[in-house]
Amino acid sequence: MTNDRHSSRRQKLIQAIRKGGIAGLLVSNSKNVSYLTGFTGEDSYLLIGPTNVQIFSDSRFETQLQMECPGVPAMIRNSKTTMIEFLAQELIKHKLPNLGIEATSMTVDVRDNLADKLGSVTLVAKTGLVEELRQIKDAGEIEELRLAVDQAERGFSIMKSMLMPTMTERQAAHDLEHGMRRFGALKAAFEPIIAVGDHGALPHYRAGLRRFEESTFVLCDWGAVSPQGYHSDLTRVWSTGKVPPKLLRIYGVVLNAQQAAIAAIRPGVKCQDVDRVARAVIEEAGYAKYFGHGLGHGIGLDIHEGPRLSPISSEVLKPGMVVTVEPGIYLPGIGGVRIEDDVVVTRDGYEVITSVSRELGG
Ligand code: ZN
Ligand code: ZN
């Protein structure tokens, strides 16, 4: 990604900072720092405001900062000063009346310590200023997400081709992660969920010691992290033999719910309305109480980010948002079905960027 892209993101953030009534924002969330500068290291803070931009880091990252974000002045602390002392010393020079801090990433301990050393500078807790910008992906970010999907799908095919009845869920999860890395993923987007039989009824099961031969039904929820840190997120269920009739029935319901919700995606639609489309199909079929989670979430530098597709989400879809659509029905003691795809909100509708088969037989 070019420097221009990062500097235009910073310009947008400065507008939000002005609107937010603060003199500047101290960005502490490392993914937000990376989004705004291109710097991929950790433990660094970015000061950004109408009149200044500076990144505070330590000597481990000195060269990396020059390479990754030459346009952002870097302040490197020496090993005799703590980061908080260094930040306070430098920030005080700007004579800001107040300073925004990221309430969801700065610990109370750091906040108190910094407030103590900054004296008259009021720290103002802010939430979601950068995250709001991150919801709308530019063309380069959408390409990265396509790459993360491709890596996940290739890893999935490798894993499936290697499955044997005596293998455990955990062994398959290992093959899946290995496969994704073989195709260039940095790592798995999260610990893959591979659930054989009724383990699929636990929406956040991981992968355990059950063997594939113990059931004919499998649920897999997985994703990859692309080289620039973007996350894909998919879920598929499949059968290795005769499917219990109840699972076959809920599979049809979940697929209908998912397809109806995807078809409802376009700019200007409320996220809660997309959720409602899927929920109505599941309710109609009599399974309302077995679909307890929201319909989906944004993906990007985080595996879960805005916007949320849920019954309580007041957000509105905009072009460039990328969301998962993942309805599910979970029948305790029997099994669960969830089908999850990744969808880009386009200027006039949507594009599904995942393509691995949704067929049960595969
Ligand atoms: Zn998932
Ligand atoms: Zn998801």
Image (spheres, helix red, strand yellow):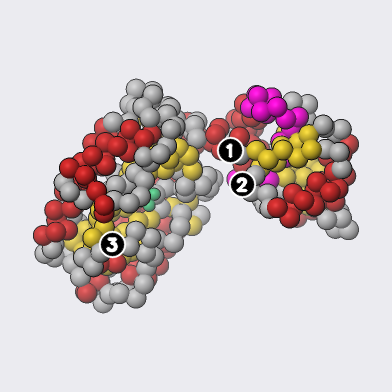
Horizontal side of 47 relative to 172 (left or right) equals right
The residue indicated by pointer 3 is 201
Mark 2 CB near ligand 2 (8 Å cut):
no
Alpha carbon distance from label 2 to label 3:
31 Å
Q: What residue is rendered at 29% in x and 67% in y?
A: 199
Of the numbered discs 3 and 1, the one sitting upstream in the chain is 1
Of residues 334 and 156, the one drawn nearer to the viewer in this rendering: 334
Task: Judge whether 209 appears above or below 84 on screen.
Answer: below
Residue at 45 percent of width and 43 percent of height: 299
The residue depicted at 85 percent of the width and 33 percent of the height is 94
Which of the two labelled residues, at mark 2 and mark 3, occupies the earlier sequence position?
Answer: 2
Where is residue 286 drawn, in percent x and y? 17, 49
* Residue at mark 1: 128
Q: How many marks?
A: 3
Residue at (13% x, 62% y) in the render: 243
Q: Was residue 289 drawn as part of the magenta stretch in this picture?
A: no
Q: Residues within 10 Å of mark 1 (few under 14, many from 20)?
A: few
**SS assignment at label 1:** loop
Please provide the residue range marked out in magenta.
15-31
Q: Secondary structure at mark 3?
A: helix
User: Is 80 placed left or right of 72 in the picture?
Assistant: right
Q: Position of residue 44 (x, y in %)?
A: 72, 48
User: Pointers 2 and 1 in contact (CB under 8 A)?
Assistant: yes
- Amino acid type of disc 1? Gly
Q: Is residue 105 above or below residue 345?
A: below
According to the picture, the residue beneath numbered tag 2 turns out to be: 104
Tell me if residue 341 can be seen.
yes
For the residues marked 3 and 1, what is the alpha-carbon distance in whole angstroms? 33 Å
Q: Amino acid at mark 3?
A: Ala
Residue 54 rendering spot, x and y as whole percentages: 77, 37
Q: Earlier in the sequence, mark 2 or mark 1?
A: 2
